[in-house]
């Protein structure tokens, strides 16, 4: 009889935790450890389950995630933290298998893994290969815009939108106006940028789907850099990656078939990321889209768990 991997989700009632449970429910190789709802704030019971698990997902606010991590004394338990708490912390490996060559080896060996944020996943996947290739200077002041479905705001925001009655919610809602969005530190650290990007997130009146756009002036890049060179560097980095698709340069399906309109929701209900390079002779817009509840959160966490356990990376996804 095959050995089952024991998995516990601390914070199983939240948006990310519920979606992870949905992924795991179809798996015969996973034994899901569950806490009695009446004891979900019982530190002793949580500690017991965390330490019994082969893999434990932390789907908690930052402070609670740090407290949960401190409860783990079993050296064989692997924590995958979906909060922001440990994404740039020493001793934690960033849970993005496609980040760089060798990242999967780090994830297999790690017992402390931080799951990327949704906005930052798209941003990092766009820029890291171009910075590594020397095409985008690491000290370049970069800006980015992200439009996302309201599910990224969690239960309260979902309830707010689905309740209706507020006409303001029909229009896009820019936020993060203090320029201190919680994803910016990981966006900086894991791309290799030395200057914090100016980041403008926007919530739209749709459930899920996310697209990050990064505009660049070719004159500010490595001398002689063309849109073709940017596109080729992305293709080279992601060749063979099952969940990342680099679309054709100046994607005809977007520009012609869709009349120039970009479908933010086209990756919904998948674990895929679509990457685009749109360009003129002097400027380019890099774009990446994903499901903010899938590859932007729960799907990424399950993918990383599969890598850590030495399983097929797409199992259950």
Image (cartoon, rainbow, N blue to C red):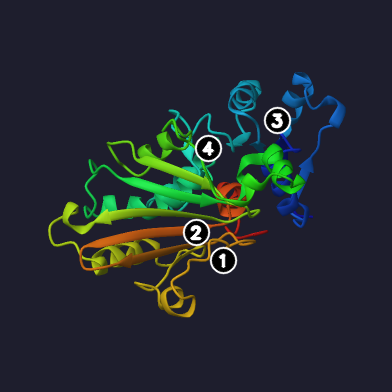
Q: Disc 4 and disc 1: Cα gap in Å?
A: 26 Å
Residue named by callout 4: 114
Say which label, 2 or 3, has the lower sequence index.
3
Say which label, 3 or 1, has the lower sequence index.
3
Give percent across and percent down for residue 272: 54, 62
**Quadrant into which the N terminus falls:** bottom right
> Image height check: is 154 above or below 223?
above
Say which label, 2 or 4, has the lower sequence index.
4
Q: Disc 1 and disc 2: Cα gap in Å?
A: 8 Å
Q: Residue furthest front?
A: 167
Q: Disc 2 and disc 4: Cα gap in Å?
A: 21 Å
Between circles 2 and 3, the one closer to the viewer is 2
Give percent across and percent down for residue 38: 87, 27
Residue named by callout 2: 289
Residue named by callout 1: 266
Give percent across and percent down for residue 271: 58, 59
Between circles 2 and 4, the one closer to the viewer is 2
Say which label, 4 or 1, has the lower sequence index.
4
Q: Quadrant of residue 46?
A: top right
Say which label, 4 or 3, has the lower sequence index.
3
Label 1 with label 2: CB-CB less than 8 Å: yes
Say which label, 1 or 2, has the lower sequence index.
1
């Amino acid at each position: 009889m095959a050995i089952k991997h024991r998995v516990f989700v601390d914070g199983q009632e939240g948006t990310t935790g519920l979606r992870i449970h949905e992924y795991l429910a179809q798996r015969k190789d996973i034994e899901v450890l569950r806490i009695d709802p009446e004891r979900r704030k019982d530190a002793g019971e949580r500690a017991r389950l965390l330490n019994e698990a082969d893999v434990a997902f932390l789907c908690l606010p930052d402070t609670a995630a740090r407290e949960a991590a401190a409860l783990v004394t079993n050296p064989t338990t692997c924590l995958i933290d979906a909060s922001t708490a440990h994404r740039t912390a020493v001793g934690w490996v960033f849970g993005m298998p496609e980040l760089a060559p060798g990242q999967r080896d780090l994830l297999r060996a790690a017992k402390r893994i931080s799951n990327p944020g949704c906005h930052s996943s798209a941003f990092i996947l766009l820029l890291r290969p171009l910075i590594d290739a020397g095409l985008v200077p690491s000290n370049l002041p970069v800006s980015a815009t992200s439009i996302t479905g309201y599910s990224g705001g969690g239960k309260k925001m979902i309830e707010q939108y689905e309740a209706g009655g507020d006409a303001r919610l029909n229009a896009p809602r820019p936020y993060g106006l203090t320029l201190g969005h919680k994803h910016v530190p990981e966006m900086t650290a894991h791309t290799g940028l030395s200057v914090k990007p100016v980041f403008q997130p926007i919530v739209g009146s749709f459930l899920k789907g996310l697209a990050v756009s990064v505009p660049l002036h070719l004159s500010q890049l490595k001398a002689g850099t063309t849109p073709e060179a940017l596109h080729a560097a992305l293709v080279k980095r992601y060749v063979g990656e099952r969940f990342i698709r680099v679309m054709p340069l100046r994607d005809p399906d977007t520009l012609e078939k869709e009349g120039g309109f970009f479908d933010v929701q086209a990756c919904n209900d998948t674990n895929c990321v679509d990457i685009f390079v749109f360009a003129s002779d002097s400027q380019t817009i890099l774009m990446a889209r994903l499901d903010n509840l899938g590859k932007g959160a729960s799907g990424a966490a399950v993918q990383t768990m599969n890598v850590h356990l030495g399983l097929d990376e797409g199992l259950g996804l």
